[in-house]
Image (cartoon, grey):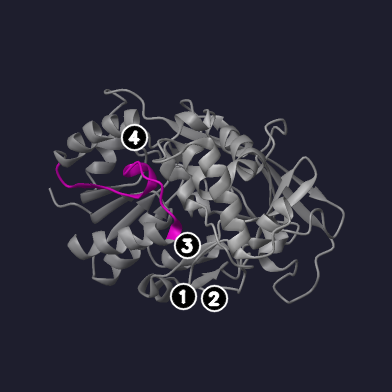
């Protein structure tokens, strides 16, 4: 029987939207579905009091990939937002990422040489030669003082595990600089889409059929019958009915409120790094767009979100894959099953059980399109 579509794309996040755009450009007919009532997946931004609220957590686009940057700029204009995060440890404020500002506040040092000597002293005192876990990796990079105040409590809240039980590579994502540079990302291109991420994805999906509130796994047989091939961006273990067991994720919930004041914390993101504060960070969304509306006017209100990390359970939204050895072995078994499935491509953060930055998701989708 002749199928109505060339591709059924499950998920309207960045991976699905890019794939749909690229395949449509080659003349293929695509149907894009999502179980949520809105497009854009976890980059969805919702207008609250004239402010684009990052409903599923803050997203700052950053990349060194010029092809990816040129691609996304076809659909929107980006502002010049540069992320500089603040760490709050029991009322003491420090710069993130770790830079000379951080080292100066912590130790009173003023030169890179002094900072490096201090870190070397603390690394030697702890007796680390080859870091075996996140705690040892963090101390090797920034010393015990910074680890105890700015890494340990935050990380253990975020992952729900002792730092000794977490892989060392997690901390390597956080830049360490011996310069007075407070830019969080080492990226040539950076910014926030003017009009929000939802507008970006809406433009990617322009002219393409989209069905929302449509759960693929509940109607799999019927939906599979519509298309020659399927692109699946949901959780890989859910696709197979969890028959090999559950992959582990960290989930996140947000408490969001509108405040009748022009500013709450004066910065887009403040991390709370002590173990006692129940949330990991507070996001003040207006500062992603400089506290202005689209016409450059100051906004009299502000919207904040307190972010709480939790262990994922069925029914929760999976955010961060727990890429430890145990989950890596289980994912490898699911991947083998996926490779034996005919006419289906598993992609994106959930489909590949992989921590992806936004530019990496787009790059992976563009590469997959070139082989489709």
Name the foreground residue: 80 vs 119: 119
Q: Is residue 356 magenta?
A: yes
In terms of secondary structure, where does tag 2 sit? Answer: loop
Q: Which residue is mark 4?
A: 217
Q: Is residue 288 magenta?
A: no
Find residue 77 and name its label.
Answer: 2
| Mark pair 1, 3: CA separation | 12 Å
In terms of secondary structure, where does tag 3 sit? Answer: helix
- Where does the magenta region start and end? 342-358
In the shown orientation, is residue 216 left or right of residue 316?
Answer: left
| Mark pair 4, 2: CA separation | 36 Å
Q: Which residue is mark 1?
A: 73
Q: Is residue 105 above or below residue 340?
A: below
Q: Which residue is mark 3?
A: 201
Residue 33: x percent and y percent? 38, 49
Question: Callout 3 environment at 10 Å: few (<14), some (14 to 19), or many (20+)?
Answer: many
| Mark pair 2, 1: CA separation | 6 Å
For the question of whether residue 58 can be seen, the reply is no
Quarter of the image for the C terminus: give it.
Answer: bottom left
| Mark pair 3, 2: CA separation | 13 Å
Residue at (62, 63) in percent of width and height: 83
Q: Nearer the viewer, mark 1 or mark 4?
A: 1
- Earlier-in-chain disc, 1 versus 3: 1
Q: Nearer the viewer, mark 3 or mark 4?
A: 3
């Amino acid at each position: 029987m002749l199928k109505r579509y060339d591709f059924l794309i499950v998920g309207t996040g960045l991976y699905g939207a890019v794939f749909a755009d690229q395949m449509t450009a080659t003349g293929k007919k695509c149907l894009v579905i999502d179980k949520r009532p809105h497009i854009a997946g976890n980059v969805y931004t919702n207008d609250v009091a004239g402010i684009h609220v990052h409903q599923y957590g803050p997203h700052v686009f950053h990349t060194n990939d010029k092809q990816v940057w040129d691609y996304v700029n076809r659909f929107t204009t980006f502002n010049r937002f540069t992320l500089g995060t603040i760490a709050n440890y029991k009322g003491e404020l420090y710069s993130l990422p770790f830079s000379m500002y951080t080292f100066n506040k912590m130790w009173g040092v003023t030169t890179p040489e002094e900072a490096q000597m201090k870190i070397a002293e603390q690394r030697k005192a702890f007796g680390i030669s080859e870091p075996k876990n996140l705690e040892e990796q963090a101390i090797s990079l920034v010393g015990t003082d910074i680890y105890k105040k700015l890494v340990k409590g935050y990380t253990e809240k975020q992952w729900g595990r002792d730092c000794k039980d977490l892989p060392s590579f997690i901390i390597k994502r956080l830049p360490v600089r011996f310069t007075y540079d407070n830019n969080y990302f080492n990226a040539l291109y950076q910014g926030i889409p003017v009009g929000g991420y939802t507008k970006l994805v809406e433009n990617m999906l322009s002219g393409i059929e989209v069905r929302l509130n449509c759960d693929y796994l509940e109607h799999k047989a019927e939906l599979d019958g519509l298309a020659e091939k399927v692109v699946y961006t949901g959780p890989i273990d859910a696709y197979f009915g969890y028959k090999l067991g559950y992959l582990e994720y960290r989930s996140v919930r947000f408490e969001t409120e509108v405040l009748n004041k022009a500013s709450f914390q004066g910065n887009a993101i403040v991390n709370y790094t002590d173990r006692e504060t129940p949330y990991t960070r507070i996001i003040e969304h207006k500062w992603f767009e400089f506290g202005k509306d689209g016409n450059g006017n100051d906004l009299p209100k502000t919207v904040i979100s307190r972010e709480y990390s939790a262990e994922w359970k069925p029914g929760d939204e999976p955010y961060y894959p727990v890429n430890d050895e145990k989950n890596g072995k289980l994912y490898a078994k699911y991947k083998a099953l996926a490779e034996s499935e005919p006419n289906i491509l598993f992609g994106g953060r959930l489909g590949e059980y992989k921590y992806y930055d936004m530019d990496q998701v787009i790059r992976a989708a563009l590469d997959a399109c070139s082989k489709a």
